[in-house]
């Protein structure tokens, strides 16, 4: 009987002990994910009366950070513990970082009760607020499951280009994802052979997944990144096939931690599907060489200073070629698989070509600025530099544009984009050295034909006849794009909810007031945009669901474009944008740009019901931020 009682008492003791609150000090506590690299918890002191977080801050010297008084901790049961006090930083006040860019402070909260194993640090929900999730009080991170990565053989080359029209599917799954305005955004640069290169935005679902179908005409390459994992991934895609990318956000947080060496490393990203082994090799190995290359390029830029200030184009071109040869040697000697070496060799060559193409503009601008020359003198100087450049660019360098795999690199597309803005005939007049025999000529022709479509102008019969002469994949891509555009324009003829407006005869100083006057008493979102602005168009697509969500709110959307947006293109685009539309003259647009200090598009202003501008932002900050700011302007 005594033995039984002893066993029972032991069990009860174990249970009771296991239910005691965690007390004492936790050094460098484990955590799952954070949305910032600025603040990190170095220690937690747990007592019966308080919970004290010791915080390490790292930020740009002489810039400020802030901890707001609404900061709280939240446990796994949903209970919240509001901040009590702070030491070393004053709540709700700007804290200016010292010369070192490093600071320490403590934050005190109520005690955490029995049985809590994990807490979240939530500094607020405004844009830029600090959040750290899954801070472990029990010292145990939950297990995470990642598939086994495929391995690329060291002698495997870059894939052979398969020319075929189709849609390549990219699926992303972010493990450890938390719905958060700063981490939800997915951005990818689509190096589509027949469209202008540029970043496109998307957003992770609440479960951390994202899927996009990318129209392609051949084996292609995109760059994918997120606010959550602070890295651009090189991803190869195949027409008609699916590539999957599983990202471990917890490992990303570990890598950026001050205490990274105190917890074991985990796989960061694993690829499945089309080109899984190749994509894996780039994810695992690209960073080391990319960083080495970036350091060298920064040093190279400094070494070019004398050539840039001597205004001698031949010296500059010779020096750039010499430095590029050194980069090529670095790539050749790097401990990388053959496919990654081949990629970087093409990357270096196409970037050199692009840089040489634009060298005359840089020298002409520098000389004009230094010597206070006139606009006419700048144009004359630029023309002379361009003629000299045409003689200096090596013919064998230009031949890289006929290497199919070069289309995997950014530099190739930056050069190709020239033909998205002018006819091949015009382009070859301005850039005669680009007229080469090979596949690039067909691509240039196809890009020029796509230009009208991207500007919302359907191709006429004459241009469609030229389309028929292109390779099948290019022809199918352009035919489908043209058909989709015609269908969109026809659909837009029946669309309601948008209105074209004229400013009328009004003084510049009264222009903005006259535009918003009819909507006084309402909250107004003013969007400065242009039809040719890729980020503007992407943001407009992202805003559509939010506008639908807020359709019962008293909000007016005003879109201001300029004459730089072609009228036909503008008229064909605006039916997709419900709201009030103005196409301002260049002088009107410049005037508003000056008074509101608009440095680029898109730029947004929010006007409250009293007519006061209460928020301004350049660049699309995301739908959550937009929603918060609009509701704030409405007093909600």
Image: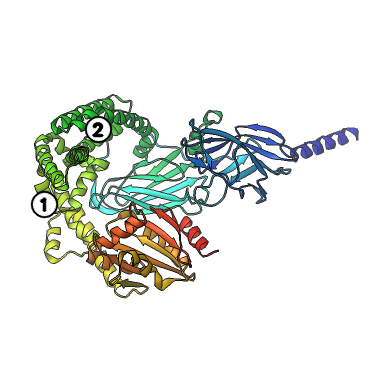
Most foreground residue, 624 or 65: 65
Real-space Cα separation, disc 2 to disc 1, in angstroms? 30 Å
Local packing at callout 1 (Cα closer than 10 Å; few below 14, some 14-19, many 20+) is few
> With respect to residue 261, does 212 lie above or below?
below
Q: Give the foreground label among 2 and 1.
A: 1
> Is 282 situated left or right of 522 in this image?
left
Q: Position of residue 287 (x, y in %)?
A: 37, 33
Residue highlighted by disc 1? 426
Q: Identify the residue shown where x is 33% and y is 47%.
A: 189
For this view, does 438 lie left or right of residue 126?
left
Q: Residues within 10 Å of mark 2 (few under 14, many from 20)?
A: many
Q: How is the image coloured?
A: rainbow
Mark 2 vs 1: CB contact within 8 A: no
Quarter of the view holding residue 573 = bottom left
Image quadrant containing the C terminus:
bottom right
Residue 283 at x, y percent in the picture: 38, 37
Is residue 156 among what the camera can see? no
Among the 4 quarters of the image, the one containing residue 12: top right
Q: Earlier in the sequence, mark 2 or mark 1?
A: 2
Tell whether 191 sits left or right of 52.
left
Which corner quadrant holds the N terminus?
top right
- Whole-percent x, y for residue 202 in the image: 40, 53
- Any mark on residue 345, and which? 2
Task: Describe the element under mark 1 as helix, strand or loop.
Answer: helix
Q: Residue at x 13, y 66 (%)?
A: 461
Q: Is residue 570 visible?
A: yes
Q: In the rendering, at what x and y percent does residue 113 appear?
A: 73, 44
Disc number for residue 9: none
Q: Is residue 303 above or below residue 218?
A: above
Report the front residue among 211 and 112: 112
**Is 599 drawn above or below residue 555 in the view shown?**
above
Judging depth in this view, the residue of 271 and 341 nearest the camera is 341
């Amino acid at each position: 009987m005594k033995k039984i009682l002893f066993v029972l008492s032991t069990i009860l003791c174990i249970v009771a002990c296991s239910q005691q609150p965690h007390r004492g000090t936790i050094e460098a506590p484990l955590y799952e994910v954070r949305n910032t690299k600025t603040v990190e918890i170095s220690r937690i002191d747990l007592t019966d009366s308080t919970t004290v977080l010791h915080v390490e801050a790292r930020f740009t010297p002489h810039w400020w950070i802030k901890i707001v008084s609404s900061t709280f901790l939240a446990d796994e049961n949903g209970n919240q513990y509001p901040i009590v006090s702070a030491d070393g930083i004053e709540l709700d006040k700007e804290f200016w970082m010292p010369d070192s860019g490093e600071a320490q402070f403590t934050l005190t909260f109520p005690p955490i009760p029995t049985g809590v194993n994990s807490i979240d640090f939530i500094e607020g929900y405004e844009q830029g607020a600090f959040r750290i999730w899954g801070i472990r009080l029990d010292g145990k991170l939950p297990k995470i499951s990642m598939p086994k990565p495929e391995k690329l053989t060291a002698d495997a080359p870059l894939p052979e280009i398969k020319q075929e029209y189709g849609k390549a599917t990219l699926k992303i799954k972010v493990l450890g994802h938390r719905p958060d305005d700063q981490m939800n955004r997915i951005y990818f640069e689509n190096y589509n052979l027949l469209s202008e290169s540029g970043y496109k935005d998307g957003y992770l679902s609440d479960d951390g997944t994202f899927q996009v179908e990318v129209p392609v005409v051949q084996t292609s390459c995109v760059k994918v990144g997120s606010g959550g994992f602070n890295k651009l991934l090189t991803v190869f895609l195949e027409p008609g096939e699916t590539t999957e990318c599983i990202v471990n956000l917890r490992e990303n947080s570990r890598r950026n931690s001050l205490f990274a060496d105190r917890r074991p490393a985990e796989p960061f990203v694993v690829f499945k599907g089309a080109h899984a082994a190749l994509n894996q090799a780039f994810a695992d190995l690209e960073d080391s060489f990319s960083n080495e290359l970036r350091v060298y390029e920064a040093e190279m830029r400094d070494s070019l200073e004398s050539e840039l200030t001597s205004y001698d184009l031949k010296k500059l071109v010779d020096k750039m070629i010499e430095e590029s040869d050194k980069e090529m040697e670095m790539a050749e000697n790097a401990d990388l698989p053959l496919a990654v070496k081949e990629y970087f060799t093409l990357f270096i060559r196409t970037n050199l070509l692009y840089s040489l193409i634009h060298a005359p503009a840089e020298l002409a601008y520098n000389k004009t600025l230094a010597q206070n020359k006139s606009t006419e003198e700048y144009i004359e100087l630029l023309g002379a530099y361009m003629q000299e450049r045409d003689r200096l660019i090596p013919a064998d360098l230009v031949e890289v544009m006929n290497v199919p795999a070069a289309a995997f690199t950014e530099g190739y597309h930056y050069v190709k984009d020239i033909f998205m803005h002018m006819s091949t005939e015009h382009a070859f007049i301005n850039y005669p050295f680009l007229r080469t025999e090979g596949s690039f000529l067909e691509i240039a022709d196809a890009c020029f034909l796509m230009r009208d479509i991207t500007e919302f102008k359907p191709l006429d019969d004459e241009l469609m006849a030229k389309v028929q002469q292109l390779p099948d994949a290019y022809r199918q891509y352009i035919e489908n794009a043209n058909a989709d555009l015609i269908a969109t324009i026809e659909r837009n003829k029946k669309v309601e909810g948008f209105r074209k407006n004229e400013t009328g005869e009004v003084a510049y100083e009264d222009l903005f007031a006259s535009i918003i006057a009819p909507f006084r008493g309402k909250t107004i979102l003013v969007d400065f945009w242009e039809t040719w602005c890729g980020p503007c168009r992407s943001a407009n697509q992202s805003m559509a669901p939010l506008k639908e969500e807020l359709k019962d709110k008293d909000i007016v959307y005003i879109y201001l474009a300029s004459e730089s947006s072609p009228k036909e293109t503008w008229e064909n685009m605006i039916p997709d944008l419900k709201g009030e539309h103005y196409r301002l003259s260049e002088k009107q647009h410049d005037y508003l740009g000056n008074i509101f200090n608009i440095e680029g598009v898109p730029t947004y202003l929010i006007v409250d019901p009293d007519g006061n501008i209460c928020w301004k932002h350049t660049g699309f900050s995301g739908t959550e931020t937009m929603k918060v700011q609009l509701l704030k302007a409405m007093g909600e």
